[in-house]
Image: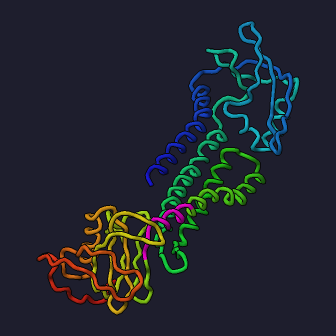
Amino acid sequence: MMLPVLLLVAWEAVIIAVTWAPVDLVMKQWETLRYQPVTARVEKFWIEEKGKRRIPRVQYVYTLNGIAYEGNVIRPGPTRLLSRNAAEVDALEERFASGTQVTAYVNPANPGDAVLVPGATADAWADVLSRLPFHIATLYWLALALWYSRKALFVCSTIPGGYRIRQYPGAVLCTFLGAWALCCFGCTLVNAAFAADLAMVLWGPVVAAAPALAYTAWREWTMTQAFDIVVDTKMGTIAVPLWTDFSTRPERATLYLYNIKSIQVHPAQYSGVFDTDGYEVMLMMEGTPAIRRIGPASSLEKAENAAMWLAERCGIPFRRVAIAPMPDEEGGEQDFEEDDDEDTANERGKPGKQS
Protein backbone atom coordinates (compact mmCIF):
# COMPACT_ATOMS: atom_id res chain seq x y z
CA MET A 1 0.00 0.00 0.00
CA MET A 2 2.81 2.40 0.84
CA LEU A 3 4.62 2.02 -2.48
CA PRO A 4 1.79 3.51 -4.61
CA VAL A 5 1.44 6.37 -2.14
CA LEU A 6 5.16 7.09 -2.22
CA LEU A 7 5.12 7.04 -6.02
CA LEU A 8 2.20 9.48 -6.02
CA VAL A 9 4.02 11.79 -3.61
CA ALA A 10 7.14 11.73 -5.78
CA TRP A 11 5.09 12.40 -8.92
CA GLU A 12 3.27 15.33 -7.29
CA ALA A 13 6.59 16.78 -6.09
CA VAL A 14 7.99 16.64 -9.61
CA ILE A 15 4.88 18.26 -11.10
CA ILE A 16 4.84 21.05 -8.52
CA ALA A 17 8.57 21.70 -9.04
CA VAL A 18 8.21 21.80 -12.83
CA THR A 19 5.17 24.04 -12.55
CA TRP A 20 6.69 26.42 -10.04
CA ALA A 21 10.25 26.74 -11.34
CA PRO A 22 9.72 28.66 -14.61
CA VAL A 23 7.57 31.36 -13.02
CA ASP A 24 9.45 31.51 -9.73
CA LEU A 25 12.89 31.93 -11.30
CA VAL A 26 11.72 34.66 -13.66
CA MET A 27 10.00 36.46 -10.80
CA LYS A 28 13.13 36.41 -8.68
CA GLN A 29 15.23 37.63 -11.59
CA TRP A 30 13.07 40.67 -12.39
CA GLU A 31 12.26 41.57 -8.82
CA THR A 32 15.82 41.53 -7.48
CA LEU A 33 17.65 43.17 -10.38
CA ARG A 34 17.42 46.91 -10.93
CA TYR A 35 16.23 46.80 -14.51
CA GLN A 36 16.83 49.90 -16.61
CA PRO A 37 14.01 51.60 -18.53
CA VAL A 38 14.77 52.53 -22.16
CA THR A 39 12.69 53.75 -25.08
CA ALA A 40 11.65 51.08 -27.57
CA ARG A 41 9.61 50.99 -30.74
CA VAL A 42 7.11 48.21 -31.48
CA GLU A 43 7.91 46.71 -34.88
CA LYS A 44 5.03 44.28 -34.98
CA PHE A 45 2.21 43.06 -32.78
CA TRP A 46 -0.05 40.15 -33.67
CA ILE A 47 -2.26 37.53 -32.03
CA GLU A 48 -1.58 33.86 -32.57
CA GLU A 49 -4.66 31.65 -32.64
CA LYS A 50 -4.29 28.20 -31.06
CA GLY A 51 -7.68 26.59 -30.91
CA LYS A 52 -9.70 28.77 -28.56
CA ARG A 53 -6.63 30.45 -27.13
CA ARG A 54 -5.43 33.87 -28.34
CA ILE A 55 -1.75 34.30 -27.60
CA PRO A 56 -0.30 37.84 -28.03
CA ARG A 57 3.07 38.13 -29.79
CA VAL A 58 5.28 41.21 -30.19
CA GLN A 59 8.57 42.30 -31.69
CA TYR A 60 10.24 45.55 -30.61
CA VAL A 61 13.66 47.20 -30.89
CA TYR A 62 15.57 49.31 -28.39
CA THR A 63 19.01 50.84 -28.09
CA LEU A 64 21.32 50.65 -25.08
CA ASN A 65 24.83 52.15 -25.01
CA GLY A 66 24.65 52.71 -28.76
CA ILE A 67 23.84 49.08 -29.52
CA ALA A 68 20.47 48.06 -30.99
CA TYR A 69 18.67 45.05 -29.60
CA GLU A 70 15.50 43.16 -30.46
CA GLY A 71 13.04 41.88 -27.91
CA ASN A 72 9.91 39.74 -28.02
CA VAL A 73 8.95 39.32 -24.36
CA ILE A 74 5.86 41.13 -23.13
CA ARG A 75 5.94 40.06 -19.49
CA PRO A 76 7.96 37.61 -17.33
CA GLY A 77 6.48 34.17 -16.94
CA PRO A 78 4.83 31.73 -19.34
CA THR A 79 3.23 33.32 -22.40
CA ARG A 80 0.08 31.26 -21.86
CA LEU A 81 -0.76 33.46 -18.86
CA LEU A 82 -1.46 36.32 -21.26
CA SER A 83 -4.00 34.24 -23.17
CA ARG A 84 -6.24 33.46 -20.20
CA ASN A 85 -8.00 36.81 -20.20
CA ALA A 86 -9.48 37.96 -23.51
CA ALA A 87 -9.93 41.54 -22.26
CA GLU A 88 -6.26 41.71 -21.32
CA VAL A 89 -5.23 40.47 -24.76
CA ASP A 90 -7.31 43.21 -26.40
CA ALA A 91 -5.78 45.81 -24.07
CA LEU A 92 -2.27 44.67 -24.97
CA GLU A 93 -3.10 44.84 -28.67
CA GLU A 94 -4.19 48.46 -28.26
CA ARG A 95 -1.30 49.40 -25.99
CA PHE A 96 1.47 47.88 -28.10
CA ALA A 97 0.18 48.58 -31.59
CA SER A 98 2.75 48.43 -34.40
CA GLY A 99 4.86 51.61 -34.63
CA THR A 100 4.09 52.71 -31.05
CA GLN A 101 6.84 54.18 -28.85
CA VAL A 102 6.89 52.29 -25.54
CA THR A 103 9.15 51.83 -22.53
CA ALA A 104 11.13 48.60 -22.34
CA TYR A 105 12.85 47.38 -19.18
CA VAL A 106 16.32 45.95 -19.75
CA ASN A 107 18.43 43.73 -17.58
CA PRO A 108 21.74 45.65 -17.15
CA ALA A 109 23.66 42.43 -16.64
CA ASN A 110 22.38 41.09 -19.95
CA PRO A 111 21.09 43.88 -22.26
CA GLY A 112 19.56 41.30 -24.58
CA ASP A 113 16.94 40.50 -21.92
CA ALA A 114 14.07 42.96 -21.86
CA VAL A 115 10.37 43.04 -21.11
CA LEU A 116 7.62 45.55 -21.72
CA VAL A 117 5.74 44.81 -18.45
CA PRO A 118 8.25 44.02 -15.68
CA GLY A 119 7.84 42.40 -12.28
CA ALA A 120 5.77 39.60 -10.87
CA THR A 121 2.06 39.84 -11.56
CA ALA A 122 -0.91 38.55 -9.67
CA ASP A 123 -1.80 36.28 -12.59
CA ALA A 124 1.61 34.64 -12.48
CA TRP A 125 1.36 33.91 -8.78
CA ALA A 126 -2.24 32.76 -9.10
CA ASP A 127 -1.29 30.40 -11.92
CA VAL A 128 1.10 28.58 -9.62
CA LEU A 129 -0.77 28.77 -6.33
CA SER A 130 -4.13 27.81 -7.83
CA ARG A 131 -2.71 24.43 -8.79
CA LEU A 132 -1.58 23.42 -5.32
CA PRO A 133 -5.07 22.58 -3.94
CA PHE A 134 -5.69 20.36 -6.96
CA HIS A 135 -2.35 18.62 -6.47
CA ILE A 136 -3.11 18.02 -2.80
CA ALA A 137 -6.66 16.86 -3.52
CA THR A 138 -5.43 14.53 -6.25
CA LEU A 139 -2.86 12.93 -3.98
CA TYR A 140 -5.36 12.55 -1.13
CA TRP A 141 -8.19 11.06 -3.16
CA LEU A 142 -5.98 8.71 -5.17
CA ALA A 143 -4.35 7.39 -1.99
CA LEU A 144 -7.79 6.98 -0.40
CA ALA A 145 -9.10 5.29 -3.54
CA LEU A 146 -6.26 2.77 -3.44
CA TRP A 147 -6.95 2.07 0.22
CA TYR A 148 -10.67 1.62 -0.35
CA SER A 149 -10.04 -0.52 -3.42
CA ARG A 150 -8.21 -2.96 -1.21
CA LYS A 151 -10.78 -2.66 1.56
CA ALA A 152 -13.52 -3.37 -0.96
CA LEU A 153 -12.20 -6.89 -1.40
CA PHE A 154 -13.31 -7.72 2.11
CA VAL A 155 -15.22 -10.96 1.93
CA CYS A 156 -15.05 -13.72 -0.63
CA SER A 157 -17.33 -16.67 -0.04
CA THR A 158 -17.00 -19.92 -1.92
CA ILE A 159 -20.48 -21.39 -2.32
CA PRO A 160 -21.83 -24.16 -4.52
CA GLY A 161 -22.21 -22.72 -7.98
CA GLY A 162 -19.70 -19.92 -7.86
CA TYR A 163 -18.31 -16.97 -5.93
CA ARG A 164 -20.08 -14.29 -3.98
CA ILE A 165 -18.20 -11.04 -3.37
CA ARG A 166 -19.28 -8.43 -0.87
CA GLN A 167 -17.99 -4.89 -1.45
CA TYR A 168 -18.04 -1.53 0.27
CA PRO A 169 -20.07 1.16 -1.56
CA GLY A 170 -17.45 3.68 -0.43
CA ALA A 171 -14.91 2.10 -2.76
CA VAL A 172 -16.94 3.09 -5.82
CA LEU A 173 -17.49 6.62 -4.53
CA CYS A 174 -13.85 7.06 -3.59
CA THR A 175 -12.68 5.77 -6.95
CA PHE A 176 -14.92 8.27 -8.72
CA LEU A 177 -13.72 11.15 -6.51
CA GLY A 178 -10.12 10.17 -7.17
CA ALA A 179 -10.81 10.16 -10.90
CA TRP A 180 -12.49 13.56 -10.63
CA ALA A 181 -9.51 15.00 -8.74
CA LEU A 182 -7.17 13.56 -11.36
CA CYS A 183 -9.27 15.16 -14.06
CA CYS A 184 -9.09 18.56 -12.34
CA PHE A 185 -5.34 18.09 -12.01
CA GLY A 186 -5.13 17.53 -15.76
CA CYS A 187 -7.15 20.69 -16.36
CA THR A 188 -4.67 22.74 -14.38
CA LEU A 189 -1.82 21.36 -16.45
CA VAL A 190 -3.23 22.16 -19.86
CA ASN A 191 -4.87 25.47 -18.89
CA ALA A 192 -7.37 25.07 -21.67
CA ALA A 193 -10.36 27.33 -22.28
CA PHE A 194 -13.36 27.03 -19.97
CA ALA A 195 -15.33 24.88 -22.40
CA ALA A 196 -12.45 22.43 -22.72
CA ASP A 197 -11.99 22.36 -18.94
CA LEU A 198 -15.68 21.65 -18.47
CA ALA A 199 -15.53 18.82 -21.01
CA MET A 200 -12.60 17.27 -19.14
CA VAL A 201 -14.46 17.52 -15.83
CA LEU A 202 -17.50 15.81 -17.33
CA TRP A 203 -15.79 13.11 -19.38
CA GLY A 204 -12.45 12.82 -17.59
CA PRO A 205 -13.70 10.59 -14.75
CA VAL A 206 -14.92 8.01 -17.25
CA VAL A 207 -11.43 7.67 -18.67
CA ALA A 208 -9.58 8.19 -15.41
CA ALA A 209 -11.67 5.64 -13.50
CA ALA A 210 -10.97 2.88 -16.00
CA PRO A 211 -7.51 1.92 -14.59
CA ALA A 212 -8.80 2.00 -11.01
CA LEU A 213 -11.80 -0.15 -11.85
CA ALA A 214 -9.62 -2.55 -13.84
CA TYR A 215 -7.23 -2.80 -10.90
CA THR A 216 -10.10 -3.48 -8.51
CA ALA A 217 -11.55 -6.14 -10.79
CA TRP A 218 -8.13 -7.76 -11.14
CA ARG A 219 -7.67 -7.81 -7.38
CA GLU A 220 -11.10 -9.33 -6.91
CA TRP A 221 -10.39 -12.10 -9.38
CA THR A 222 -6.90 -12.98 -8.16
CA MET A 223 -7.78 -12.82 -4.48
CA THR A 224 -10.97 -14.79 -5.08
CA GLN A 225 -8.83 -17.64 -6.36
CA ALA A 226 -6.44 -17.41 -3.40
CA PHE A 227 -8.77 -17.92 -0.42
CA ASP A 228 -11.59 -20.32 0.35
CA ILE A 229 -14.25 -19.57 2.96
CA VAL A 230 -17.54 -21.45 3.21
CA VAL A 231 -20.34 -19.32 4.63
CA ASP A 232 -23.47 -20.58 6.34
CA THR A 233 -25.83 -17.62 6.77
CA LYS A 234 -28.04 -19.55 9.20
CA MET A 235 -25.29 -20.41 11.62
CA GLY A 236 -22.92 -17.47 11.16
CA THR A 237 -20.42 -15.82 8.86
CA ILE A 238 -16.65 -15.70 8.75
CA ALA A 239 -15.45 -12.41 7.25
CA VAL A 240 -11.73 -12.24 6.54
CA PRO A 241 -9.94 -9.42 4.64
CA LEU A 242 -8.55 -11.12 1.56
CA TRP A 243 -5.30 -9.19 1.47
CA THR A 244 -4.51 -10.38 5.01
CA ASP A 245 -3.12 -13.85 5.55
CA PHE A 246 -5.48 -15.19 8.20
CA SER A 247 -2.85 -17.60 9.45
CA THR A 248 -0.30 -14.85 10.10
CA ARG A 249 -2.54 -11.91 11.02
CA PRO A 250 -5.65 -13.42 12.60
CA GLU A 251 -6.24 -10.27 14.66
CA ARG A 252 -7.29 -8.54 11.42
CA ALA A 253 -10.21 -10.91 10.94
CA THR A 254 -13.79 -9.95 11.61
CA LEU A 255 -15.46 -12.94 13.19
CA TYR A 256 -19.16 -13.72 13.39
CA LEU A 257 -19.50 -17.31 14.63
CA TYR A 258 -22.26 -19.03 16.59
CA ASN A 259 -22.15 -22.15 18.73
CA ILE A 260 -18.82 -23.58 17.68
CA LYS A 261 -18.44 -27.24 18.63
CA SER A 262 -14.76 -27.76 17.88
CA ILE A 263 -11.75 -26.32 16.08
CA GLN A 264 -9.15 -28.57 14.51
CA VAL A 265 -6.21 -28.38 12.11
CA HIS A 266 -6.06 -30.66 9.06
CA PRO A 267 -3.83 -31.14 6.03
CA ALA A 268 -5.09 -28.83 3.31
CA GLN A 269 -6.71 -30.54 0.31
CA TYR A 270 -8.92 -28.36 -1.85
CA SER A 271 -10.15 -30.80 -4.41
CA GLY A 272 -11.98 -29.10 -7.26
CA VAL A 273 -11.06 -25.57 -6.18
CA PHE A 274 -7.31 -25.45 -6.19
CA ASP A 275 -4.51 -27.68 -5.03
CA THR A 276 -2.12 -26.51 -2.37
CA ASP A 277 0.26 -27.79 0.26
CA GLY A 278 -0.05 -26.88 3.92
CA TYR A 279 -2.72 -26.93 6.59
CA GLU A 280 -6.18 -25.56 7.15
CA VAL A 281 -8.32 -24.74 10.17
CA MET A 282 -11.60 -26.65 10.36
CA LEU A 283 -14.59 -25.49 12.40
CA MET A 284 -17.46 -27.76 13.48
CA MET A 285 -20.67 -25.86 14.22
CA GLU A 286 -23.24 -26.95 16.77
CA GLY A 287 -26.46 -28.21 15.21
CA THR A 288 -25.23 -28.52 11.62
CA PRO A 289 -23.03 -31.06 9.80
CA ALA A 290 -21.38 -28.29 7.71
CA ILE A 291 -17.67 -27.72 8.09
CA ARG A 292 -16.15 -24.22 7.98
CA ARG A 293 -12.75 -24.02 6.34
CA ILE A 294 -10.24 -21.25 7.00
CA GLY A 295 -6.94 -21.26 5.20
CA PRO A 296 -4.85 -22.64 3.85
CA ALA A 297 -1.85 -21.88 6.04
CA SER A 298 1.64 -22.40 4.67
CA SER A 299 2.88 -24.12 7.80
CA LEU A 300 1.55 -26.11 10.75
CA GLU A 301 2.68 -23.41 13.16
CA LYS A 302 0.66 -20.73 11.37
CA ALA A 303 -2.42 -22.92 11.22
CA GLU A 304 -2.14 -23.73 14.93
CA ASN A 305 -1.70 -20.07 15.83
CA ALA A 306 -4.84 -19.18 13.89
CA ALA A 307 -6.79 -22.03 15.48
CA MET A 308 -5.64 -21.09 18.99
CA TRP A 309 -6.68 -17.49 18.40
CA LEU A 310 -10.10 -18.62 17.19
CA ALA A 311 -10.50 -20.89 20.20
CA GLU A 312 -9.73 -18.03 22.55
CA ARG A 313 -12.15 -15.66 20.79
CA CYS A 314 -14.92 -18.24 20.72
CA GLY A 315 -14.56 -19.29 24.36
CA ILE A 316 -13.55 -22.89 23.72
CA PRO A 317 -11.43 -23.99 26.73
CA PHE A 318 -8.38 -25.68 25.34
CA ARG A 319 -4.88 -24.46 24.58
CA ARG A 320 -3.92 -26.64 21.66
CA VAL A 321 -5.95 -28.03 18.79
CA ALA A 322 -5.77 -31.51 17.36
CA ILE A 323 -3.97 -32.45 14.17
CA ALA A 324 -6.39 -34.69 12.31
CA PRO A 325 -6.57 -36.15 8.80
CA MET A 326 -8.78 -34.54 6.17
CA PRO A 327 -12.43 -35.51 6.77
CA ASP A 328 -14.62 -37.14 4.17
CA GLU A 329 -15.96 -34.49 1.76
CA GLU A 330 -19.19 -36.33 1.00
CA GLY A 331 -20.78 -37.01 4.19
CA GLY A 332 -22.65 -35.19 6.94
CA GLU A 333 -21.41 -35.15 10.52
CA GLN A 334 -17.73 -36.10 10.69
CA ASP A 335 -15.82 -37.67 13.56
CA PHE A 336 -12.37 -36.10 13.91
CA GLU A 337 -9.34 -37.62 15.52
CA GLU A 338 -8.15 -35.52 18.41
CA ASP A 339 -4.90 -35.48 20.35
CA ASP A 340 -4.97 -37.18 23.69
CA ASP A 341 -2.19 -34.93 24.92
CA GLU A 342 -2.61 -33.39 28.33
CA ASP A 343 -2.81 -29.98 26.70
CA THR A 344 -5.74 -30.94 24.50
CA ALA A 345 -7.61 -33.42 26.63
CA ASN A 346 -9.48 -30.77 28.62
CA GLU A 347 -13.19 -30.95 28.46
CA ARG A 348 -14.66 -28.56 25.91
CA GLY A 349 -17.41 -26.38 27.22
CA LYS A 350 -20.30 -25.36 25.10
CA PRO A 351 -19.90 -21.65 24.29
CA GLY A 352 -22.78 -19.29 24.02
CA LYS A 353 -23.59 -17.13 21.02
CA GLN A 354 -20.57 -15.14 19.95
CA SER A 355 -20.47 -12.03 17.80
Above or below, 174 against 288 in this view is above
Q: Tell me where residue 101 sits by quadrant.
A: top right
Name the side, left or right, on which 18 lies relative to 229: right
Q: Tell me where residue 246 sits by quadrant.
A: bottom left
Residue 207 in magenta stretch: no
- Read off the magenta span: 218-229
Q: Position of residue 24 (x, y in %)?
A: 58, 33
Q: Position of residue 340 (x, y in %)?
A: 15, 78
Q: Position of residue 92 (x, y in %)?
A: 80, 35
Above or below, 270 against 122 in this view is below
Q: Nearer the viewer, residue 59 or 170?
A: 170
In percent of the image, x 66 and y 59: which residue is there? 205
Q: Position of residue 156 (x, y in %)?
A: 48, 72
In percent of the image, x 80 and y 42: which residue is there? 53
Residue that lies at the very extreme toward the right in this rendered image: 99
Above or below, 159 against 46 in this view is below
